[in-house]
Every structure is written in C-alpha cells, then in structure tokens.
Image: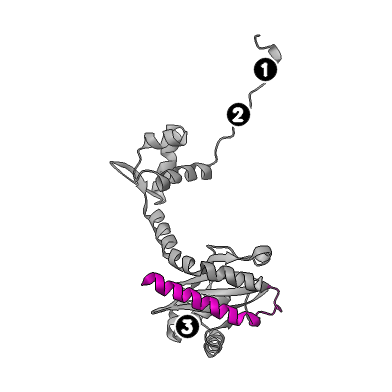
Amino acid sequence: MGATRSDAATPRARAPQPGVIAKLTDILDLFVAGPDRLRLDEVAVLTGQPRSSTARTLAQLVDLEWLERDERGYALGPRMRRVGRRVEGHLPLRSAAADPLHELHAATSAVVHLAILDRGQVEMVDKLGGLRTSAIPTTVGTRYPAETAVAGRAMLASLPPERVDELLTGGRATGALHDRLHGIRRRRGVAVTTDDMPWDLRGIGAPILGPHGPVGAISVGLPGRHASVERFAPLLARAVRQTTRRLVGAAG
C-alpha cells in the first residue's frame, strides 16, 4: 500500500552524526591499527565521512602535529610519535611492577600507585584500589608537582639536594622541603605524607632505584589524614625489591 498523508508527513529520525572528537578518534585509529600511510579518499571511505569534512579534519590534525602529510599521503605525526615513545618507555616499569602492585594491594586493601619523576613533576602510571579507588582522586596519566606527592618526595629524596634545586624551579625547593627530604633519607628513602601536603589522605612511598637515580616509586595510601600507613612499610619495601629485581632481569 502507498503511504498515507500522515505517514508522508512524519519526519524520519536521522541517525546521530558523530561529534568532532569521535571523528578525530576514528581517523587516528586508522593510522594506529592500519597502514603507515593513507590518502584522503581512503580515509573518507574507511571512516564513512564526507570527503570535504574529512579533508578539514585531516588538515586540523596536521596543524596540531597528530598527523603529517607529504606527496604519498598522511601518516602519524611527531606529536603522536612522542606519545608512543612515552607509553613504550613506561612499559618495562609497569610490567616489572604489575605483580608486586597486585600483591601489595591484596595484602593491604589500600590504594597502590606506581609513579615516575619527570622534570619536577610526578606522573601516575598505574593505580590499584579496589573499592577504595574513588576515595583517593588520582588518575593514571595525571601529573602533579613532585613535592606535593609522597611518591614524588620519595624520588626527590634519592637525588642530591642540588639536583632537587634544578628540578623544582620557581622557588619550590624551600628550606622546609629540603629538611623533609633529609628526614626521608634518614629513613632509608621511605616518605610519609605530612600536614603540608594538599591531599585528604595518608600515604607512604619508596623509590625504585636504577643505576642513574630513581626510575619510579611505589606508594600505598588510605583516605583520611589520620589513617595508619606506617605498618605497610615492610610490604612496600618488598614490592620495591621485587620490582627492582624484575627490571634488572628484563634489562639483562
């Protein structure tokens, strides 16, 4: 039967169009999982997007250095390659620490972090917490001033004071902080949160040391400024030793 007047007048629901972020993600996924180089028409066909809008999106990605372009087409750009190098750089450490972190979390039921030190900042590269995960508002990939995190202070204390001054620019390496770091050194590198830290938690951390300084740190934390964490020190030390042995074995 033909369509009735009311049927013809009823507008058909249109499928939602992907947003800008979705378009960018679809295009970048092609280059991450597919060929090294693609031409404009190939990208448009594979993403199902109009050629004109695909060209605009590709131009934006080139301007931002996520992609690069030459006569052969488009390829991953310098910014994406830098991201890849950072991820690959963390893989040996994360792999070496994976089992020790899980064992530490299982033994303490606390939130466990793996962090690295990068130019005066600490970056969280792994986090385990179970039911307590959301109680401590840290996120993998987030960076904080090193002196504000217990893992950061543990790594800073493993460096000479003059190196700390070089890393913490802008007057951040205060006399009070150096006194704190000296106390951490006297405790064989174990750092504990103090009242001057901007966190509603209590944690304990220790560095993972390589031949040229700290390659990372492991910390254990509980929500609340009066939580008892010092009892975790032997378990934390064991996790650090295990991770160090695994890193040395992987390098050998």
Of residues 216 and 21, the one nearer the viewer is 216
Label 2, on which residue?
14
Q: Where is residue 105 in the image (x, y as percent from the top left)?
A: 61, 70
Instruction: State how far apart marks 3 and 2 are (Cα).
Output: 60 Å
Of residues 20 and 36, the one nearer the viewer is 36
SS for dot 3? loop
Q: Select label 1 or label 2 by which is in front.
A: 2
Looking at the rendering, the stretch of residues picked out in magenta corresponds to: 223-252
Label 1, on which residue?
9
Q: State whether the magenta stretch is mostly helix, strand or loop.
A: helix
Kind of residue indicated by mark 2: Arg
Kind of residue indicated by mark 1: Ala
Is 239 in the magenta?
yes
**Which of the two labelled residues, at mark 3 and mark 1, occupies the earlier sequence position?**
1
Residue 226 vs 85, above or below: the answer is below
Label 3, on which residue?
158
The image quadrant that residue 127 belongs to is bottom right
